[in-house]
Amino acid sequence: MKIGIPICKGFIAPRFDCAEEFLIMEITDGQTIKKHVLRCLGQNPLRRALLMIQVPVNAIVCFRIDNFSLRLLEDHKITIITEQSGLLEDVLKHCLQRFDPEES
């Protein structure tokens, strides 16, 4: 599973369309297999959403997301998990627990 997390200065971005970059994590059996960062400064919400579709990610973990991006991403079968905020490391721990099949 690939997860996209919009980040800004080491925190989850307050909104999907405010992200300076996206952390892309590949998770298998509750473990991070690979992660890398995609820069996206100066891109509009459409370009940010298309970037996540092109990666492609299976889920996006964010705090808030605009309706246009939400509909577009959901139309491409990308799961959106909102109301996640705080330090990136804390959210990463939560993501690993959430996507760990043994915890389900």
Image: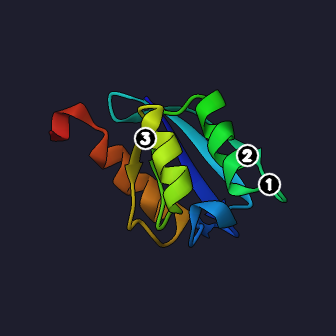
In this rendering, the answer to whether 75 lies above or below 81 is above
Q: In which image quadrant can residue 21 be found?
A: bottom right
Residue count near mark 1 (Cα–Cα under 10 Å), binned few <14, some 14–19, many ≥20: some
Q: Amino acid at mark 1?
A: Gln
Query: Which residue reaches farthest left?
Result: 104
Give the alpha-carbon distance from disc 1 to disc 3, as whole Å: 20 Å
The residue to which callout 2 is attached is 47
Give the labeled residue for mark 3: 74
Q: Residue at x 37, y 45 (%)?
A: 96
Q: Earlier in the sequence, mark 2 or mark 3?
A: 2
The answer to which image quadrant residue 18 occupies is bottom right
Q: Are marks 2 and 3 in contact (CB under 8 Å)?
A: no
Which colour scheme appears in the figure? rainbow
Name the kind of residue labelled 2 in the image. Answer: Arg
Q: Secondary structure at mark 2?
A: helix
Residue located beneath label 1 in the image: 43
**Does residue 17 lie above or below 55 as drawn?**
below
The residue lying at 60 percent from left, 40 percent from top is 24
Residue at 68%, 55% (x, y): give it: 45
- Kindly identify the amino acid type of the residue bearing the numbered disc 3: Glu
* Element class at badge 3: helix
| 69 relative to 84, above or below | above
Q: Secondary structure at mark 1?
A: loop
Please provide percent x and percent y for residue 91. 44, 60
Work out whether residue 78 can be spotted: no
